[in-house]
Image (cartoon, rainbow, N blue to C red):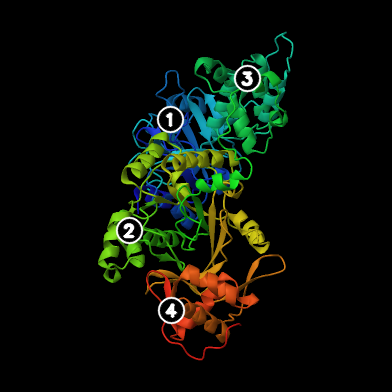
């Protein structure tokens, strides 16, 4: 168990609600923004820390196990039962503990649990006062905040951007010392310094409301004012940089006043004056934040102005257009080599393998990688040739990686040629922390692919390689997928990403309505991105149901799979698959007639006693009955024929006759 997870479990044992915070890696916030204004202090892996902060041990393990780089956030307030006084006494002119004790008329530091922040500040923690309701207060005095309802602190052993860790005082930590109630004098002090009456600038300049101002105001008031302090400050800085003078300040005051527990006019004027326009934040930040809350930019619905002269003078790019009948032949020249199931995997393919937790996504992907590396058979379809494959993973510790690999790779049963092929064409990583939203990490992956000649890369799981990204945010997902597009375009690699499906009733409703692929997190972005989608659903008795959505070939029918640990491979369970009146696949009782087995044997005899599986299936479909023309029926027929000892399949996927008995006349 890593140190961060150990501390996280200790915090929840105290009843404190916690959640993950971005950490610091190589001096930079793990959100990937090198200019982050809240390095190592803002939430990661959650959409709403207020709703998702928890004391659930399993959820804590999901977040922190294997992610030592994360920092820990502790939600303060009534639900966690704590209140924190946040002093930045190291700053010039900052309000100090001694000054507060003088104003409160009593001791504070002597009874508090004390945490040193790593940046020179201190958190003084107390039991939440009974019968009170205290919201978080920002800058009651210079360098002094109160973290209570609606607030949070970063907790040990988190790493500060200074390079130092947050630490508890040896004898003043919450495990050695029981929390004391915040003294009444301190409670009264906090209440005295809360002023919810906004002070507006009222100079005589006219109120100008151009379209840009209306657009800015429209976006701002879509954002709830109870955002975190850092985002609140960033919004203020963005308004300050909008060049609207006092109108922007008044707008900030009006918007902030919708959240009285955070709105402190006595400090806002000071904050506003401290903003430096030359080093400020672009107003576009406000539009980006507003879109997360459902705001639609009216400018997007405005049509561009067409100027005929511009069209006539501009250089015309026709490289992506095919003309006339020749389009059929010209387009065919661009067709890539198909490696598996025709066009399900090919150079430049983008693939998503998705499913709920514990559906075997990683094992499925690893089995596919292993077979791709040796040009072997996967789900009864042979890879056309060995493909150099990299499994890029971020979940399994290097020391335990061999256990996972041994489940699917039995070196004792591989031929010398297969062992050599596997050594040459298969590679995997230890658990690594890379952020594909970071240019340096994306270039690292491109360099590995190019220099080592990898043709097929599996990213497992996608979300671990884009920490902090919100899958439900189309803009953020589009940004990530655009970067992956650039990687694929530059390297021509076939890229498969492992991803999760949504949980809860909404997913169940989508599955019930046969809109299964909409259950993938970020589906509205991903479904327009991938060439091939594979969705895994867990069934009874350890079986997995696989569904396929393939753009560049006829559909692959659903399959019921089982991981055969003895054979160390995924096998397809025998079943009859049909479509119901809604066009959805359902499973009936297996129907494999003797006449279909005879038909398969006859096909093989007509072609010299053996055929590659794909050709055997094509010929079988020509001769069998109408109800037997599906891929699943062919699989069932083949299985029955093998079980009867009439045919066999070799490692290369060729089907050949063993015995011929009771052949019926041609025609079924």
Rendered position, 27 above or below 548: above
Tell me the residue that label 2 is attached to. 401
State if disc 1 and disc 3 touch (CB < 8 Å): no
Q: Position of residue 517 (x, y in %)?
A: 60, 56
Tell me the residue that label 1 is attached to. 34
Say few, some or many: other residues with alpha carbon within 10 Å of mark 4 (under 14 / 14 to 19 / 20 or more): some
Q: As rendered, which of 47 and 576 lies closer to the eye?
A: 576
Q: As rendered, which of 388 and 323 lies closer to the eye?
A: 323
Find residue 313 and name its label. 3
Distance (Cα) linking label 4 and label 3: 67 Å
Q: Position of residue 378 (x, y in %)?
A: 43, 65
- Upstream in sequence: badge 4 or badge 3: 3
Between disc 4 and disc 1, the foreground one is: 4
State if disc 1 and disc 2 touch (CB < 8 Å): no
Rendered position, 101 above or below 605: above
Q: Position of residue 38 (x, y in %)?
A: 47, 31
Rendered position, 13 above or below 584: above
Say few, some or many: other residues with alpha carbon within 10 Å of mark 2 (under 14 / 14 to 19 / 20 or more): some
Between disc 4 and disc 2, the foreground one is: 4
Residue 130 visible (yes or no): no
Say few, some or many: other residues with alpha carbon within 10 Å of mark 1 (under 14 / 14 to 19 / 20 or more): few
- Circle 2: element type: helix
Residue 404 visible (yes or no): yes
- Circle 3: element type: helix
Distance (Cα) linking label 2 and label 1: 32 Å
Tell me the residue that label 4 is attached to. 609
Between disc 2 and disc 3, the foreground one is: 3
């Amino acid at each position: 168990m890593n140190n961060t997870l150990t501390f996280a479990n200790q915090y929840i044992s105290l009843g404190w609600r916690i959640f993950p915070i971005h950490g610091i890696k190589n001096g930079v916030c793990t959100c990937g923004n090198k200019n982050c204004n809240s390095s190592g202090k803002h939430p990661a892996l959650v959409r709403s820390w207020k709703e998702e902060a928890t004391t659930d041990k399993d959820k804590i393990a999901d977040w922190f196990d294997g992610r030592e780089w994360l920092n820990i956030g502790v939600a303060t307030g009534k639900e966690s039962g704590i209140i924190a006084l946040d002093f930045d006494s190291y700053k010039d002119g900052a309000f100090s503990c001694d000054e507060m004790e003088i104003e409160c008329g009593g001791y504070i530091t002597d009874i508090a649990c004390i945490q040193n922040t790593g940046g020179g500040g201190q958190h003084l923690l107390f039991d939440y006062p009974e019968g009170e309701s205290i919201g978080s207060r920002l800058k009651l005095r210079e360098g002094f905040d109160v973290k209570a309802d609606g607030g949070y602190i970063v907790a040990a052993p988190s790493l500060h951007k200074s390079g130092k860790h947050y630490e508890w005082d040896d004898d003043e930590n919450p495990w050695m010392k029981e929390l004391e109630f915040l003294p009444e004098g301190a409670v009264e002090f906090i209440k005295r310094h809360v002023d919810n009456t906004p002070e507006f600038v009222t100079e005589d300049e006219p109120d100008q409301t151009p379209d840009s101002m209306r657009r800015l105001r429209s976006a701002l008031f879509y954002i709830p004012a109870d955002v975190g302090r850092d985002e609140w400050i960033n919004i203020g800085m963005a308004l300050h940089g909008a060049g609207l003078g006092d109108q922007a300040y008044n707008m900030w005051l009006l918007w902030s006043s919708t959240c009285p527990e955070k709105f402190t006019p006595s400090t806002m004027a000071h904050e506003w004056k401290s903003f430096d326009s030359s080093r400020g934040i672009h107003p576009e930040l406000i539009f980006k934040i507003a879109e997360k809350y459902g705001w639609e930019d009216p400018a997007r619905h405005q049509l561009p102005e067409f100027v005929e002269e511009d069209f006539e003078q501009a250089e015309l790019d026709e490289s992506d257009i095919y003309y006339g009948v020749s389009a059929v032949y010209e387009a065919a020249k661009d067709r890539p080599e198909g490696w598996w199931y025709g066009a399900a995997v090919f150079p430049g393919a983008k693939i998503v393998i998705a499913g709920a937790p514990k559906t075997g996504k990683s094992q499925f992907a690893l089995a596919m990688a292993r077979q791709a590396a040796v040009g072997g058979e996967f789900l009864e379809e042979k890879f056309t040739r060995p493909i150099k494959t990299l499994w890029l993973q971020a979940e399994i510790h290097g020391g335990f990686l061999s256990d996972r690999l041994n489940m699917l790779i039995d070196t004792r049963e591989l031929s010398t040629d297969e062992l050599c092929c596997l050594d040459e064409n298969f590679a995997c990583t230890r658990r690594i922390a890379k952020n594909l939203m970071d240019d340096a990490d994306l270039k690292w992956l491109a360099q590995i692919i190019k220099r080592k000649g990898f043709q097929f890369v599996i990213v497992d799981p996608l979300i671990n390689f884009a920490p902090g990204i919100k899958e439900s945010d189309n803009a953020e997902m589009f940004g990530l997928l655009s970067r992956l597009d650039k990687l694929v375009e530059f390297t021509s690699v076939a890229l498969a990403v492992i991803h999760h499906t949504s949980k809860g009733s909404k997913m169940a409703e989508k599955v019930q309505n046969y809109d299964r692929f909409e259950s993938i997190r970020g589906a509205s972005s991903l479904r327009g991105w991938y060439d091939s989608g594979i969705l895994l659903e867990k069934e009874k008795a350890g079986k997995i149901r696989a569904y396929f959505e393939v753009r560049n070939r006829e559909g692959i029918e659903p399959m019921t799979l089982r991981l055969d640990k003895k054979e160390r491979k995924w096998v397809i369970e025998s079943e009859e698959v049909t479509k119901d009146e809604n066009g959805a696949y359902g499973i009936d009782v297996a129907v494999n007639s003797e006449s279909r087995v005879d038909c398969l044997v006859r096909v093989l005899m007509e072609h010299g006693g053996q055929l590659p599986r794909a050709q055997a299936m094509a010929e079988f479909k020509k001769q069998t009955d109408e109800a037997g023309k599906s891929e699943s029926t062919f699989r069932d027929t083949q299985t029955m024929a093998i079980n009867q000892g009439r045919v066999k399949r070799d490692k290369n996927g060729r089907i050949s006759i063993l015995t011929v008995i009771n052949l019926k006349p041609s025609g079924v």
